[in-house]
Amino acid sequence: MKNGKDWLKKSFREIAHIAKDPVLLFFILAIFTSLFVFIVYPLYKVIIVSVFSEGHFSLIILKEVISNWYFRQGLFNSILMGVLTSVFGTAIGFLFAFTLARTDIPFKKIFHLIAIIPIISPPFIGAMAIIMLFGNNGLITSSLLGLRNFKIYGFRGLLFAQVITFFPVAYITLRGVLESISPTLEDAAFDLGGSRWKVFRKVTLPLAIPGIASAVLVLFVETLADFGNPLILAGSKFPILSVQAYLQITGMYDLPKGAALALILLVPSISVYFLQKYWVARKKYVTVTGKPTTSSHKVISPAVKWILFGLCVFLTAIILLIYITILWGAFAKVWGYDNSFTLNHFQYVFSVGFKAVTDTLLIAATSTPLAGILGMIIAFLVVRKKFPGKNMMEFTSMLSFAVPGTVIGIGYILGFNSPPLILTGTFIILILNFIFRYIPVGIQSGVAILRQVDPSIEEAAIDLGADSQYTFKRITLPLMIPAFFSGLIYSFVRAMTAISAAIFLVSAKWNLMTVQIMSQVESGRLGAASAFSVLLVGIILAAIIVIRFILTLFYGGFKGTMLKI
Amino acid sequence: MSVKLVNISKVFKDQEDVRKRVIAVDHVNLEIKEGEMVTLLGPSGCGKTTTLRIISGFETPSSGEVWISEKMVNNIPPNKRDTSMVFQSYAIFPHLSVAQNIGFGLELKGWKTKDIKVEVKKIMEIMEFSELYNRRPDQLSGGQQQRVALARAIINKPSVLLFDEPLSNLDAKLRIQMRIEIRRIQKAFGITSIYVTHDQEEAMTVSDRIVIMNEGKIMQVATPFEIYSYPANAFVADFIGRVNFIPTKVKSISKKGCVVNFGNGQKEIHPHYGEFKTDDKVILIVRPESIKMSSCEKDKTYPIKGRIDKLVYLGPTTEYEIEVDGFNRKINAVIYNPIEEGFFHEGDWVNIDFNAAATHILPALD
């Protein structure tokens, strides 16, 4: 009781303080309103539609869905796929990260760059390439080995695609973790007489455990939410929940059942995400103070080093194989039958399919800067200002990290296809979706940068006579520029490669390249799909290079690890 | 431009528990004359930084008035106050060049770029670091950042210059060099300055007057000489330098002051504060360097006799701890120039005396 009263008192004091600054008050209210409308409300709609039937509360739809064997199988498969992908993906990611962070193998930079490619390309590229390599007309299965009935659809193929798609995420996370463990700790353990294996087992691994746990959980959430790979590869015998929810809505026009499936998908995703964020992420060891010392590379023996090197070569070869396949497919007449060179697919993309290209670019180019600016403003408010509901603001804006795109997509069509907000089928709904789905990274890097900026730097400006607006414009904002651009790159990549939520929101008027690629794959036109994919990845690479170039030109390049996609 | 604090108090509400209150500054009254350099000195948490932030406007006093140049400034925000602060962390804007940092205040005043350039060059010349004009902040050493921060504060020609522990991030050698530099520049520009530090030596070097604070209250305001020689109370005596507190009684009142008992003998002391009468309990404040020792024989009677318990040889000085019968605390003594003044050894018996002119008395606490 007393705590509640104190909280009210404190809130009242804070409100009274903010009310003195109308600009600030306006921003806080506007952000709260939009977070509520575009993040919370769609989720609320998903829940409501699943638990209301004929106007009153009833669990009948949920019951129906759960009692259906096929949907239960979908849930089971989704979780199985999530568990296996996260375990294998993290294991491979760890070995990759360990090799690059702790040994002196050659070509580190090349390994790193190749491992990054899957992160910046549409998530279903792996599935596409696998079909082109191992499918019925697959290059390897059919042409090379002459196999006729090799079954790539289902469990095996999907697991392979998911591991290749998601291990780079684990790699990026774990590389950061391993690099933050000071090698002097390992040196100290050697010095005390530990063997190589013992040092790894007793020092390196235990220090990395929280990071590993975190990577496992993140991969689980991402695999569970993934939509593109299962849609292409799962097949009807191995149902996956996110695809089932999509098919219920687009195939059966059964919104309530689709929403119920989305709700079932939401529960494990959100629980695991918050387990990761509030429990595992807090357990991270911080061992670095000051400059990282250079590793002495003594952790592993030469034999193990070259085994790990071989593993890296193998993994990067698979990734390269995938992208070469796509590239080749884009220029091959009929994949699998007639692989002679043609520009027909690109001709198709630049004529019939070009509307999707310009739409995608327009939508990405509009939503990206808006997401970037909104992210910086939220980061600034969260770190530097005091107001009631501040934690709620941070929590809500981070929520879209945890919610699978399928759920968001269904929430948006449920929430915005009737008054007061009719947005379905418009440019606006795609923009809003991208903005609110991709602000978290901008917020996170903004918060991280601001927490490092000594508040007395802003005080110094005020002390010399600047008012708070001038200080924000001339001092705070320029200091946040690197965070702004890394948020920008992330939002742009995501907006260009988005599929799971966007597939519900496209229309005849506004289409996206990713959705085009999916429909080309579904209708068996792998050449056109490949050509679209090549163009898409090309645009993303060009955009990243341009953004980085601008930043180098004006701000002397990225400081620190800004490309944390 | 004078600064006046009238009955300033600052009460902080606890962040977690609004019922708890912390009194950071407790009814502080202080007047700083034009051109004067005054240091706020005290242990951490004594309220010195809060007082400085109240003068700059970053904190609002809970009660009391702040006056700068005959004007009450309580309701003037920091950006409108004619004060400039040198921050502990220097707070150099990392994305601006040295010249842009120094010229920031002039830019805000709407000066033309050309004029700002001239002025920045001028001040950098006076402060003797013109060669850094085109540098970026990440190319500066700690001492150089300190100069930039100082130049940035001075260029505005503020009425009052505020220093918040400006040297605490520098290494010992540079600290000594910079405090002389700060004093030189402050004198050269004649700016009224308030300087916060917890380093007594620094306070002694830079100040015209020192304000000793403890638990939000002012304990004494005086020149460095007075603070050291005639501390107003036991806290100040103990906080500044090292000291022997020797409890005793006033035997009689003489022309010069008080005659107090000292072991078997007596000493005539001139009290600087307060009135004393016969039989008052007092404390003798004797600095270790005022103690004089001479060899003596164990069995003879002297005014005060003691045995050397411990000694530390430091080169220019030797420090002794002497055990005296009837005293519950050991007496500390420092002998300067030990080669000429001679050594004693552990276990030696010594006769103890002190220079009455360099000694001070305070009323006993009980």
Image (cartoon, rainbow, N blue to C red):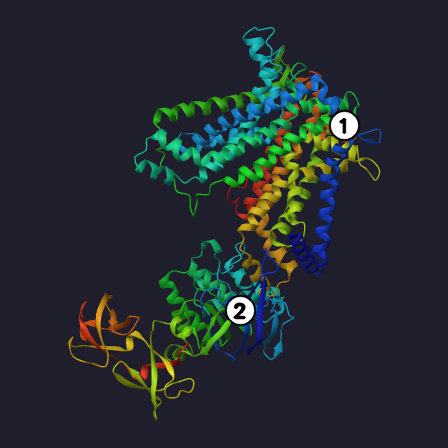
The residue nearer to you, when weighing A287 against B300, is: B300
Query: According to the image, label 2 marks what residue?
Result: B52
Amino acid type indicated by mark 1: Leu
Image location of residue A244, percent across then percent down: 71, 22
For label 1, the residue is A59
Between residue B179 and residue B214, name the one nearer to us: B214
Check the picture and name the quadrant holding the C terminus of chain A. Answer: top right
Label 2 crowd (10 A; few <14 / some 14-19 / many >=20):
many
Q: Quadrant of residue A332?
A: top right
Q: Name the residue at 23% across, 66% down.
A: B310
- Residue at mark 2 shares a chain with residue at mark 1: no
Instruction: Name the mark on residue B281.
Output: none
Residue A531 sits above or below residue B167 on the image: above
Image quadrant in which you'd find residue A321: top right
In the image, residue B355 sits, relative to residue A6, either above or below, namely: below
Residue A331 in which image quadrant = top right
Quick one: label 1, few (<14), some, or many (20+) residues within 10 Å?
few
Q: Could you tell me residue B63's position as x and y percent? A: 61, 72
Residue B223: give x, y in percent of width and height.
Answer: 42, 79
Residue A539 seen in the current view: yes
* Disc 2 chain ID: B
- Residue B231 to residue A99: above or below: below
Provide the chain ID for the residue under circle 1. Answer: A
Label 1: which secondary element: loop
Tell me if A337 is positioned left or right of B98 in this view: right
Q: Is residue B119 visible?
A: no
Mark toward the viewer: 2 or 1? 1
Q: What is the CA distance from the residue labelled 2 to the residue labelled 1?
A: 64 Å
User: On the picture, is B258 further left or further right than A524?
Assistant: left
A169 vs A261, left or right, is left
